[in-house]
Image (cartoon, rainbow, N blue to C red):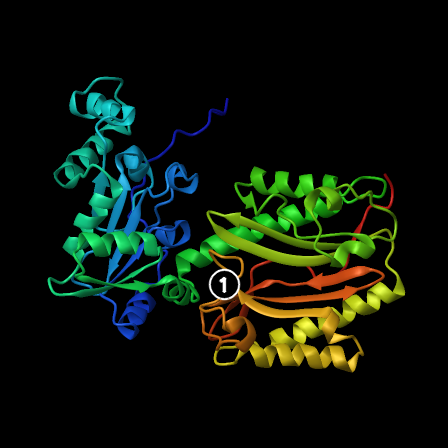
């Protein structure tokens, strides 16, 4: 008889692969004359170190961890984390060579560590010995709180002379500047982090592909639940359940920035939108945004309850043509404003009012809408290999509501990789309750 018991958890046997694009990060630091980057916000902390336990993601405290990336390759990167997450660091180790811990003695978790690891009390498991080794290795540098631990780790990471350091949270930067008696020149590095993150690494692409695959399933389950006579909340619930069941997460309260019927082109509050009872002939905008390990999936499709009309078919065809025309010219070296103009020309040729159509390129990653700088929203940017990009093309129709299509596309030197496998035809949903 086959063994149907679930497999025992396994400890990692190979070093983790960094998410961060190290060559690009160091190039940006050289460009900005930075001696180090310090991340304490969720996304950048995860990006630099790979560290994202629930204590951090759940905001157990205002500041729980930090990552330091020095500009000089001879200085090892460092993760500052809490003893509370010591076991997490055994099962999900950081790639960063230096680990600096903070641990308050009055915590029950600290007392438990002392009993189990130092005194050998309790049942021995596969976790205990590697945890004991990590505990021993980190005791010499342990500090009572995260800011003091960061201060000492930063002192190990910077040249002795005055240093120029970029922080993604200026509150933390100001505190370090005070503790270093002005030896640190403080730089707001939020946009520098975003510039680095615009070009994805192989590890990031793997997470984005997984996020897209999960989202594809959830979109189709939402469409299957969009039935005449049922409230729109039914398809919202189907989407959310499908995301969570597959190990993903939905964005915000709904996970779907969508509407149905003539009001589908408006941004409505969730309770109002989801109370709508679907009817035959309702056009549905499926703008579905989910996450997998903090990396986003963003796709849009258009659906119809029952049979499509000639008018809807025509509008959907024009939107798809405009999207494909713009994507056909997507390649390294082009400015995204040129790509928008290509799509606008298609709309003009078919006499669709471009003022009623959203035309917006954006990158996708740890943010669902990624720009290196806010000015790029209006001025565009130059496409580079390794970017993952979406073209928001949403035509708002006063009668039907809207027609929306978009996909995440990985730009390579040789062409484009579409992360989703969903076709771009209209999604015809159930006409009966």
Judged left or right of residue 275, residue 58 is left
What residue do we see at 56% from left, 41% from top?
A: 246
Against 355, residue 38 (above or below) is above
Against 241, residue 303 (above or below) is below
Judged left or right of residue 3, residue 254 is right
Residue 31 place in picture, x, y as percent: 30, 74
Residue 301 place in picture, x, y as percent: 70, 58
Residue 17 at least partly seen: no
Image quadrant in which the C terminus is located? top right
Against 119, residue 84 (above or below) is below
Count residues near mark 1 (Cα–Cα under 10 Å), then give few for <14, some for 14-19, many for 20+: many
Tag 1, which secondary structure? loop
In terms of depth relative to the viewer, which is nearer, 53 or 154?
A: 154
What residue do we see at 72% from left, 79% from top?
A: 346
Residue 226 place in picture, x, y as percent: 77, 45
Residue 344 place in picture, x, y as percent: 69, 78
In terms of depth relative to the viewer, which is nearer, 396 or 327?
A: 396
Judged left or right of residue 42, residue 302 is right
To which residue does mark 1 refer? 370
What residue do we see at 48% from left, 58% from top?
A: 365
| Count of number-bearing discs | 1
Judged left or right of residue 142, residue 38 is right
In terms of depth relative to the viewer, which is nearer, 250 or 223?
A: 250
Residue 135 at least partly seen: yes
What residue do we see at 47% from left, 24% from top?
A: 5
């Amino acid at each position: 008889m086959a063994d149907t018991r679930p497999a025992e958890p396994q400890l990692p046997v190979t070093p983790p692969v960094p998410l961060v694009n190290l060559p690009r990060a160091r190039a940006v630091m050289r460009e900005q004359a930075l001696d180090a980057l310090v991340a304490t916000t969720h996304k950048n902390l995860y990006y630099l170190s790979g560290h994202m336990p629930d204590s951090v993601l759940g905001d157990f405290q205002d500041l729980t961890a930090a990552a330091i990336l020095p500009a000089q390759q001879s200085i090892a990167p460092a993760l500052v984390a809490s003893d509370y997450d010591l076991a997490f660091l055994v099962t999900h180790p950081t790639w960063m060579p230096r680990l600096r811990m903070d641990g308050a003695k009055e915590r029950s978790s600290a007392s438990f560590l002392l009993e189990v690891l130092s005194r050998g009390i309790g049942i021995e498991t596969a976790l205990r010995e590697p945890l004991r080794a990590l505990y021993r290795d980190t005791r010499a540098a342990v500090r009572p709180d995260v800011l003091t631990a960061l201060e000492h780790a930063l002192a190990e990471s910077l040249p002795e002379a005055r240093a120029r350091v970029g922080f993604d949270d200026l509150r933390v930067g100001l505190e370090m500047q005070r503790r270093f008696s002005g030896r640190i020149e403080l730089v707001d590095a939020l946009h520098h982090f975003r510039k680095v993150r615009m070009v994805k690494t192989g590890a990031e692409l793997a997470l984005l592909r997984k996020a897209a695959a999960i989202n594809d399933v959830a979109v189709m389950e939402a469409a299957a639940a969009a039935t005449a006579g049922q409230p729109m909340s039914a398809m919202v619930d189907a989407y959310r359940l499908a995301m969570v069941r597959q190990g993903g997460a939905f964005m915000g309260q709904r996970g779907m920035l969508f509407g149905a019927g003539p009001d589908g082109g408006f941004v409505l509050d969730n309770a109002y939108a989801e109370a709508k009872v679907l009817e035959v002939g309702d056009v549905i905008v499926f703008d579905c945004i989910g996450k997998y390990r903090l990396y986003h999936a963003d796709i849009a499709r258009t659906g119809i309850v029952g049979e499509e009309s000639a008018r809807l078919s025509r509008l959907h065809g024009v939107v798809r043509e405009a999207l494909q025309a713009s994507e056909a010219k997507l390649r390294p070296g082009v400015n995204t404003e040129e790509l928008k103009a290509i799509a606008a020309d298609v709309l003009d040729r078919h006499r669709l009012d471009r003022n009623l159509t959203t035309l917006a390129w954006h990158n996708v990653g740890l943010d669902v809408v990624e720009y290196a700088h806010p000015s790029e929203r209006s001025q565009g940017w130059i496409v580079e290999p390794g970017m993952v990009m979406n073209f928001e093309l949403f035509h708002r129709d006063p009668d039907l509501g809207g027609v929306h299509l978009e996909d995440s596309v990985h730009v390579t030197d040789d062409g484009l990789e579409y992360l989703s496998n969903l076709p771009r035809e209209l999604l015809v949903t159930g006409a009966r309750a």
